[in-house]
Image (cartoon, grey):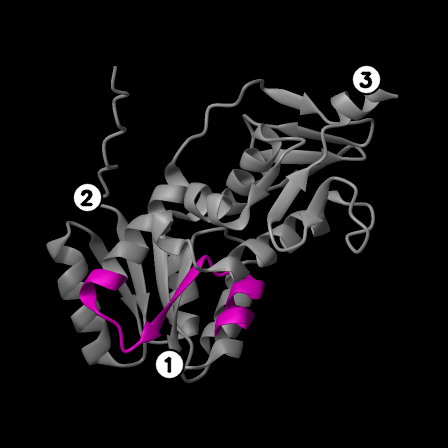
Amino acid sequence: MQTAQRPEPNFSGKRILVVDDEARMIDFIRMNLEVEGFQVLEARNGIEALDVVRKHIPDLIILDIMMPQLDGFETLRMLREFSSIPVIMLTARGEEEDKVRGLELGADDYVTKPFGVRELISRVKAVLRRTESVVEPSEAVLQVDDRLSVDFNKREVIVDGEHIKLRPTEYRLLYHLIENAGWTVPHEQLLAKVWGYEYRDETHYVRLYINYLREKIEEDPSAPKYILTERGIGYRFVNFEKETEAK
């Protein structure tokens, strides 16, 4: 008996904000996004982009790094102070530091210039897909121990009584780790489940987001007790129930 596959989400009408100081680049991206049914907003610099975000609340932002007045990094930093809208950054070829810095500031993905139309559209859909996909929790609230609990309905963690909101990717990563509590989940499996099969070689994504989660839930992120590293393989969320039973 074959299991029915989930239909591809319909992204038609989703609003994409394109931020770039080059008019030709905006026109190129706009044309290809509109062919796919997206609505396109535009901004020529970071200041204008932040204004557009506040007024129109786009579903996703494509953000260039090299811009006058306010570059992409500073724009992203200011954006993350009030919004978790997913962001894809446009980086120059070979600028590995730019990619890492963007992800650390809260970008969800990046595309390297020059890029192909299919690559850009694929990345846009992948980010929207993982942002919007709903994971059905096995229970509404999971009490991990007396310090940590996870509210799956609100997509937040409660640490020492404090409610901490998770970004969509952080939530999906934590969910898959908890669903496999006590088992080591390989890097490739986490990438396929959380980001999509096309991201299976982007292992640095997992490392960065594991760090984000540890900063939010661990008492001492440098000596984690919830999310453990299995070097060269993947990560394991500790199964406290089994450990308690063993004792």
- According to the picture, the residue beneath numbered tag 2 turns out to be 12
Circle 1 or circle 3, nearest the eye: 3
Asked if one can make out residue 116 in the rendered structure from this viewpoint, the answer is: yes
Q: Is residue 240 magenta?
A: no
Name the image quarter holding the C terminus: top right
Name the image quarter holding the N terminus: top left
- According to the picture, the residue beneath numbered tag 3 turns out to be 245
> SS at mark 1?
loop
Contact between marks 2 and 3 (CB within 8 A): the answer is no
Distance (Cα) linking label 1 and label 3: 52 Å
Q: Horizontal placement of 100 versus 32: left or right?
A: right
Choose top left, top right, bottom left or bottom right for residue 51: bottom left
Residue 66, x across and y down, in percent? 41, 82
Instruction: Look at 21% across and 69% down and name the residue there.
Output: 116
Q: Is residue 104 magenta?
A: yes
Q: Give the answer, above or below, for where 72 lies relative to 57.
A: below
- According to the picture, the residue beneath numbered tag 1 turns out to be 93
Who comes first in sequence, dot 2 or dot 3? Answer: 2
Instruction: Look at 48% across and 43% down and name the residue there.
Output: 189
Crowdedness near tag 1: few (<14), some (14–19) or many (≥20) residues, C-alpha within 10 Å: few
State the extent of the magenta-drawn residues as a range.
99-119
